[in-house]
Image (tube, helix red, strand yellow):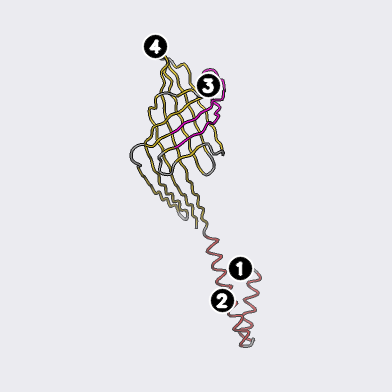
């Protein structure tokens, strides 16, 4: 919808076209053309909105198994680093081989902006410096703090992957792209300075993703 000021300007322009001098008509013709172009550009901008979000990060995970007499303890650890910070997840599960019953089941999670997790861009290695994690015991309801640390070494070839997704609905359009690199690894780790045992699986990865929302 045109504003009152714009309408008044148009009236003034028409009057000058009829009654004004040649110079004034030329000056206002140029001004009028510029206003029309600016109005069209503003209208196009108002009709289109676009949001772009980018996420870059890297991660590492590992599993260990340790035998102590009739008890076997499996430990899972993962660290995910993004632009916001680092997320760390820890889970330990102990069961009795003679009875088949679970003896202990604990899990914990923490998020930190401290520089505790580093990973090589080529996925050659990664390291999680000692970080405290509050863990919850499913059986006792007890919450305690465990100090966790781990190191990874990449093995084998780096595997690459990528994907693109596009969705359109009326004037709305969504597009996402992602790429990632993955490499198998070996890992050592400890909880409260106690070795976690035999590494049964681990890997390193990094990723890049972008999300675009556009509406006309």
Disc 4 to disc 3, C-alpha distance: 22 Å
Q: Which of 34 and 85 is in front in this view?
A: 85
Dot 4 alpha-carbon crowd within 10 angstroms: few under 14, some 14 to 19, many 20 or more: few
Q: Closest to the observer: 153 or 171?
A: 153
Q: Does the magenta stretch include residue 170?
A: no
**Mark 1, residues whose alpha carbon is within 10 Å: few (<14), some, or many (≥20)?**
few
Residue bearing mark 1: 2
Q: Reading the chain from its start, which is encountered first: label 4 or label 3? A: 4
Estimate the spatial distance between the alpha carbons at disc 1 and disc 3, rounded to whole Å: 67 Å
* Of the image marks 3 and 2, the number of the one nearer the N terminus: 2
Q: Which of marks 1 and 3 is nearer the N terminus?
A: 1
Residue 115 in percent (x, y) is at 54, 39
Magenta stretch: give its range: 126-151
Quadrant of the snapshot with the N terminus: bottom right
Q: Earlier along the polypeptide chain: callout 1 or callout 2?
A: 1
- Residue highlighted by disc 3: 137
Task: Give the mark toward the camera: 1 or 2.
Answer: 2
Asked whether disc 4 touches disc 1, contact meaning CB atoms under 8 Å apart, the reply is no
User: Residue at 61% of width from left, 68% of height from top?
Assistant: 2
Tag 1–tag 3 contact (CB < 8 Å): no
Prevailing SS of the magenta stretch: strand
Report which residue position mark 4 lands on: 98
Mark 1 vs mark 3, foreground winner is: 3
Residue at disc 2, secondary structure = helix
Q: What is the distance, in whole Å, between disc 4 and disc 1 at their CAs?
A: 84 Å
Furthest-top residue in view?
98
Q: Position of residue 7 (x, y in %)?
A: 63, 73
Residue 33, label in figure: 2
Residue 44 percent across, percent down from the top left: 52, 64
Q: Quadrant of residue 146?
A: top right
- Nearer the observer, 54 or 42: 54
């Amino acid at each position: 919808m045109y504003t009152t000021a714009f309408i008044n300007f148009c009236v003034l322009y028409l009057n000058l076209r009829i009654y004004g001098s040649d110079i004034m008509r030329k000056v206002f013709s140029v001004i009028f053309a510029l206003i029309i172009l600016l109005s069209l550009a503003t209208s196009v901008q108002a009709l289109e909105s676009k949001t772009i979000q980018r996420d870059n990060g890297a991660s590492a995970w590992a599993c260990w198994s340790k035998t102590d007499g009739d008890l076997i303890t499996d430990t899972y650890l993962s660290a995910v680093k993004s632009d916001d910070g680092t997320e760390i997840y820890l889970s330990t599960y102990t069961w009795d081989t003679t009875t088949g019953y679970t003896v202990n089941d604990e899990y914990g999670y923490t998020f930190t902006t401290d520089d505790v997790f580093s990973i090589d861009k080529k996925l050659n290695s990664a390291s999680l410096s000692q970080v405290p994690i509050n863990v919850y015991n499913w059986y006792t309801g007890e919450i305690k703090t465990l100090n966790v640390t781990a190191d990874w070494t990449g093995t084998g070839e780096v595997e690459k992957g990528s994907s693109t997704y596009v969705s359109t609905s009326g004037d709305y359009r969504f597009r996402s792209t992602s790429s990632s690199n993955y490499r198998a690894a070996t890992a050592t780790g400890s909880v409260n300075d106690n070795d976690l045992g035999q590494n049964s699986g681990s890997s390193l990865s990094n990723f890049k993703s972008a999300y675009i929302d556009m509406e006309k």
